[in-house]
Amino acid sequence: MTALPAPREGTHDQRRANGATSGRRSLAAALLLGAAGAAVALIASGQTWARGAAAVGGGAVPVTADGRDVTGVPAALAVVGLAALVAVFAVRRSGRLVVSLILALSGAGAAVSAVLGGSGSTALDAKAAQTTGDASATVHALSHTAWPYVTAGAGVLILLAGLLALRYGRWWPAMSGRYERGTGPAGVKAAARRKPVVDPDRPEDLWKALDRGEDPTGG
């Protein structure tokens, strides 16, 4: 008769320890990716995305458009993503899942909108009409910079932070848990159990109670 293998002890604890280690690493990575992505997206959105020239009389006037002229979506979603990254630590369970999803979608939306907005000429045409005073004016010699793609890359960083939150967020700490610990009836009872007992017949206990600011007489 073949003996069944004995269950290995500590397997569950080992999985929990591995999950906690992965949680700490993923937390650091998500914070770095999310914060860096939001910062780069906000900076890149203020840079020149497109250049061109508008015809005025017999000459041409140079016109430029920055990211916010082209589309304000990446910058707005970067702010949303940064707020979601902070909010991840304020919620638990299903709330954390929803916030993590918002974080990931913010990054994806910022990346897509940057790519789509970085290849058009609508913003420059509007600048040309404003510069020349001719509503039908358009630009020529149109060129685009690399900033839209830098913004898209920043959106990808925010997306990666959201994916890490979705995958490992259950192992991350919650701010509410830190401040709720030790409060409420259960916390009060635990604190009462931890309070040292003062023996009035032991002078050293009386002195220790006085040092802690307690009334050794129990009054």
Image (spheres, rainbow, N blue to C red):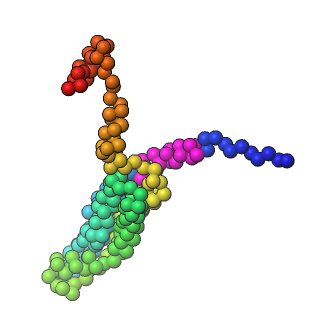
Which residue is found at the position 58% from the left and 43% from the top?
14
Taking depth in this image into account, of 217 and 140 the one nearest to the observer is 217
- Name the residue rendered at 26%, 15% in the picture: 207
Residue extent of the magenta highlight = 12-30
Q: Is residue 184 above or below residue 210?
A: below
Residue 59: x and y in percent read 20, 79
Quadrant of the rendered image containing residue 145: bottom left
Q: Main secondary structure of the magenta part?
A: helix
Q: Is residue 32 visible?
A: no
Q: Is residue 136 left or right of residue 100?
A: left
Which residue occupies the foreground of this view, 9 or 155?
A: 9
- Which residue is found at the position 42% from the left and 47% from the top? 28
Examine the image and state in which quarter residue 214 appears: top left
Residue 23: in magenta span = yes
Q: Is residue 40 depicted above or below 182 in this figure?
A: below
Report x, y in % for residue 186: 35, 43
Q: Is residue 132 magenta?
A: no
Q: Name the residue at 39% across, 71% down.
A: 112
Between residues 110 and 59, which one lies in front from this camera angle?
A: 110
Q: Is residue 14 visible?
A: yes
